[in-house]
Image: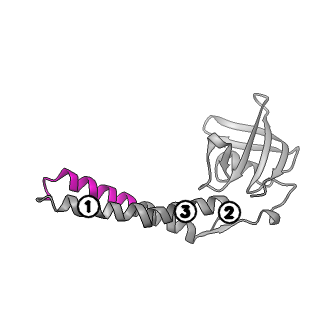
Amino acid sequence: MEYLSKQRYDEIATELKHLINEVYPKVKDDLAEASAQGDRSDNAGYREARRIQAKTISRIRFLQKILEHSRIVNPDALPKDRVGLLSQVEFTNLSTNTRMKFEIVSPHEMDLESGKISLQSPIGAALMGKKVGDIAEAQVPSGTLRLRIESIITCLQ
């Protein structure tokens, strides 16, 4: 079971609907057109159309599985005093004295450029359940990071 914000759940549902209703019919038409051009063994257009069809079907199935096995998280039910899903956490890396701020999200919502890290990432997992003032230790490829929780804000998505 995976928990998603309402916003991300709706984004995935919209992408799925677009793929099924708009992209896949076009892919099917392109494949039929390429197939009508003759010998399929020497037809690069046909092979490309089949590759695009397989990629589109794969994406559709992937998104269907995400939605099938996901639930929308109720932000009101989340703890306010501990780091959890949809928490915005400000912490200090004690080795470098650098402050960082990230939102803890599901793996399907992760976007480092937007400041969103997965709860399954080493840092996300280390922060989960901690309170303001706690020290979290995250095992990362470069070693162990010691992170002090400075503030927690539960996002209301």
Asked whether 90 or 20 is in front, the reply is 20
- Image quadrant for the N terminus? bottom right
Is residue 138 placed above or below 106 in the rendered structure?
above
For disc 2, the marked residue is: 6
- As measured in the structure, the alpha-carbon distance from the residue carrying label 3 to the one carrying label 1 is 24 Å
What is the magenta segment's predominant secondary structure? helix
- As measured in the structure, the alpha-carbon distance from the residue carrying label 1 to the one carrying label 2 is 36 Å
Amino acid type for the residue under numbered disc 2: Lys
For disc 3, the marked residue is: 14
Q: Position of residue 41 (x, y in %)?
A: 13, 56
Q: Which structural element holds mark 2? A: helix
Residues in magenta?
40-56
Toward which corner of the image does residue 113 lie, by quadrant? top right
Q: Which badge, 3 or 1, is on the more N-terminal residue? A: 3
Q: Which structural element holds mark 3? A: helix
* Circle nearer the viewer, 3 or 2: 3
Q: Which badge, 3 or 2, is on the more N-terminal residue? A: 2
Asked whether 156 or 96 is in front, the reply is 156
For disc 1, the marked residue is: 31
Question: Mark 1 Cα within 10 Å, few/some/many (few <14, many 20+)?
Answer: many
The residue positioned 71% from the left and 51% from the top of the image is 104
Q: Which structural element holds mark 1? A: helix
Q: Are marks 3 and 2 in contact (CB under 8 Å)?
A: no
